[in-house]
Image (cartoon, rainbow, N blue to C red):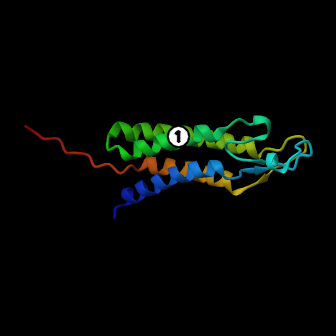
Amino acid sequence: MRFPAILHRVGLFACLLLVVSCFLPWMYFADSNIITEAQKTFTGFTTYQNQYGKPGKLLSLIAIVVFVLMLLPKIWAKRANLFITALGVGYAIKTFVLFTSCYNAYCPEKRAGIYIMLLSTILLLVTAVFPDLKLEKEKKD
């Protein structure tokens, strides 16, 4: 099997992993102002009083669009895929910094979901750099 073909399959798996990671626990805040234990655990879709937003929506949308573009055998799809994955990595880094930052002397406990989210977006960027595309040779008349 060729290297781009292997990366293509890894990229498809990373898209699915990114969507799954948005449902996993990202952070645990031991804040005394948060009353219930369920509200202290943040995911990509749930935060306390929606103060951090829902980054899982945009990350899931990016994963779905990248998945579709990876399946299209067109050069424009591969270029668009590179652009979208670069935006996704930037947004993932911003989200990682936002969620893992301390506030009011409360430092959150990082859970596996936030690391999986960051790793899968970086993996998507690497797979977009090396697309599995066979170019046709031009015919000379």
The residue lying furthest to the bottom in this view is 1
Tag 1: amino acid: Ile
Q: From the image, which quarter does the C terminus lie in? A: top left
Local secondary structure at mark 1: helix
Can residue 80 be seen from the camera position used here? yes
Relative to 27, 45 lies left or right: left
Specify the quadrant of the image occupied by residue 9. bottom left
The residue lying furthest to the left in this view is 141
Can residue 51 be seen from the camera position used here? no
The residue lying furthest to the right in this view is 32
Nearest the eye: 110 or 64 = 64
Relative to 76, 115 lies left or right: right
Q: How many numbered badges does the structure rendering display?
A: 1
Q: Residue at x 65, y 39 (%)?
A: 55
Q: Residue at x 84, y 50 (%)?
A: 37
Where residue 46 appears, as percent x and y from the top left, is: 72, 42
Which residue does the numbered mark 1 point to in the structure image? 62
Q: Residue at x 40, y 60 (%)?
A: 6
Relative to 118, 10 lies left or right: left
Q: Residue at x 53, y 40 (%)?
A: 62
Where residue 10 appears, as percent x and y from the top left, is: 46, 57
Q: Residues within 10 Å of mark 1 (few under 14, many from 20)?
A: many
Where residue 93 appears, as percent x and y from the top left, is: 65, 43
Where residue 38 appears, as percent x and y from the top left, is: 80, 49
Q: From the image, which quarter does the N terminus lie in? A: bottom left
